[in-house]
Amino acid sequence: MILEKIRDPEDIKKLNDEQVEQLCRELRAFLIRSVAKTGGHLASNLGVVELTVAIHRVFDTARDRLVFDVGHQCYSHKILTGRQSLFHTLRQLGGLSGFPKPYESVHDAFVAGHASNSVSVALGMAHARTLLGQNYNVLALIGDGAMTGGLSFEGLNDAGASGEPMIVILNDNGMSIEANVGGLSRHLSRIRSEEGYNNFKKWYKEKLQGDSPAKQNLYKVSSHVKHWLKSNLLPESTMFEKMGFSYMGPVDGHDVQKLTQMLTWAKQKNEPVLLHVLTEKGRGYPFAQQEPERFHGTPPFDAATGKPLREPSRSFSDAFGEELLALAKQDERICAITAAMTSGTGLSAFAKELPSRFFDVGIAEGHAVAMAGGMAKQGLIPVFAVYSSFLQRGFDMLIHDISLDRLHAVFCVDRAGLVGADGQTHHGCFDIGFLSAIPDMAVLCPASFSELRSMLRYAIYNTAGPVAVRYPRGGEQAYTACSDPVCFLQLRDGTDFTIISYGILINEALRAAELLAEKGISARVIKLNRISPLREDEVAQMLGGAKRLLVLEDCIAAGCVGEKIACLAAQTGSTPDKLLLKNCGARLPNEGSVEQLYHALGLDAASVAASIEEVLHEQ
């Protein structure tokens, strides 16, 4: 076994070509076995095995900077940089992250988790290298899906014009940028990938460039001919070359020898280079090749059959998708928008049954929000289903393109709160703060499937301006009731302490009250249905003279609902004698199951009950 002997990327450089091929096979087998046990991103990682090995043959990522875009394709990189023995802890509490994290290894150049930023980050590193007089290579590895994000083109435009030596590797798996260039163009592409072509190009440039007017005129004329041929026969190259890049490829992303060769040439160019690599998601595992979307992010599964070990349960995303489709069938004004998350947000059935009113804009959340503004202005009812952590990317548009004109657009904020194994970059813990800060934005928080359906209808038909409905990843829990979409309601009476919460955390609040009751402590439980706007009279009414208050939330501390309640209580003179704010604190937690994270942060029922007992004991 070669993989077992790889302790450091330098070990890869000692392998011959045959051993490198075997290493790729072993890596692929290891990925399938390991992810089958832990769950994780499989299809994308299987697609970049050879590319990752080739990068480590040519570069030293302890010194050279390899910037991943999104980062869900970094597993082979982690395995080859000394973390193979930790893969059984992947995406678990205290274990290995599923994304690049500099705190894990010097080989992880930058945090990754969201799309389209890699070229910009890499250019910043290249500028730093030049200004500080240092010597290392800078690479950005970006997938074609991330190229739908406008930030990627901002970075490419500036990087090409900068002249900074850097390499952008475009990992094209055919799901996005796919040029229809014909047989001749494919033939020319193959020629451009050959050593003879690149050597000839270098010789040709050296011979024809000089002080001689004849040489200069001949080079100028031949360059015009070359660029005309390329623009007509190889359009994908000229787009990047017009930005200032030296385009190389496309090259077979599963030919490790050719990739090694091309990366070596790109390294020698000492200018902005774009290497176009063609790969296949799920390569080497038939089930992932047939269903790359299902194996993009997968729970643990049976490696022999590809079937999940547990059948997925119904989720809030499912309930949302079903209700929105039912409403849209009755109202032709309703449209659905997603940013490359059709199945993840529960919109697959909508896309199939009402395709003319379904819009997948790709990884372009800012564009999606602005487009929703245009739809709303002209009389449609746009519903944008988006993960909480990705809606952050559309914050300016929420203000400028939605709020200023008080447009009626509905934002269904999926994966709100703690999401578990994807960790810091995917926890939805900031939307409470930034949505509540947007003028005229109403924010509703269902705690059950039935409440989600009810609040979605209310958001569409009973609100005038922008409205967000936020709900968690996964399914409902013990609380399955459906309350009217009023600001708050009391679920349990009590005199010793008042607990306020919203969303599915209301389950922990109710369980905490039960634990306290067993010890003779009476806790009142208030459920918030609407967390923004909150008014003084509503806060005074919900507190009802409470002397001791605990506000339970799974969001970041700054801008949490507890802060707003405390402020409004002070303004009305109804401030409790004792106030506990239980939330995620100042920093986001890492990976782990939601239950583990609740316990670690003190948000679970037992921790809440213990905090209340401690206060009562002190008093």
Image (tube, rainbow, N blue to C red):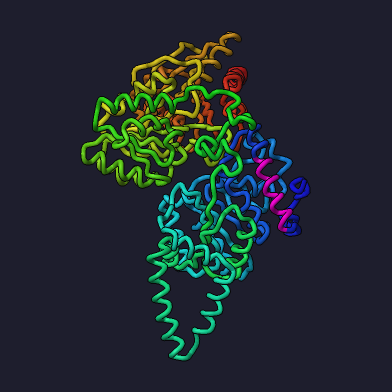
Picture quadrant of residue 363: top left
Residue at the image position 42 percent from the left and 50 percent from the top: 149
On screen, residue 342 above or below 263: above
Q: Which residues are magenta?
A: 17-31
Q: Is residue 149 highlighted in magenta?
A: no
Q: Is residue 25 highlighted in magenta?
A: yes
Q: Position of residue 123 (x, y in %)?
A: 52, 62
Residue at the image position 48 percent from the left and 22 percent from the top: 314
Q: Is residue 337 left or right of residue 256?
A: left
Count how many numbered circles sit on residues in the image.
Answer: 0
In terms of secondary structure, what is the magenta stretch mainly?
A: helix
Position of the C terminus by quadrant: top right
Residue at the image position 55 percent from the left and 36 percent from the top: 295
Residue at the image position 58 percent from the left and 71 percent from the top: 196
Q: Position of residue 549 (x, y in %)?
A: 49, 22
Q: Judge whether residue 587 can be spotted in this image.
A: no
Q: Nearer the viewer, residue 520 or 396?
A: 396
Q: Nearer the viewer, residue 96 or 208?
A: 208
Q: Is residue 131 left or right of residue 400?
A: right
- Of all residues, the one furthest to the left in this rendering is 378
On screen, residue 312 above or below 20: above
Q: Nearer the viewer, residue 559 or 85?
A: 85
Q: Is residue 280 left or right of residue 14?
A: left
On screen, residue 429 above or below 574: below
Picture quadrant of residue 449: top left
Position of the N terminus by quadrant: top right
Q: Position of residue 184 (x, y in %)?
A: 44, 63
Q: Position of residue 136 (x, y in %)?
A: 63, 65
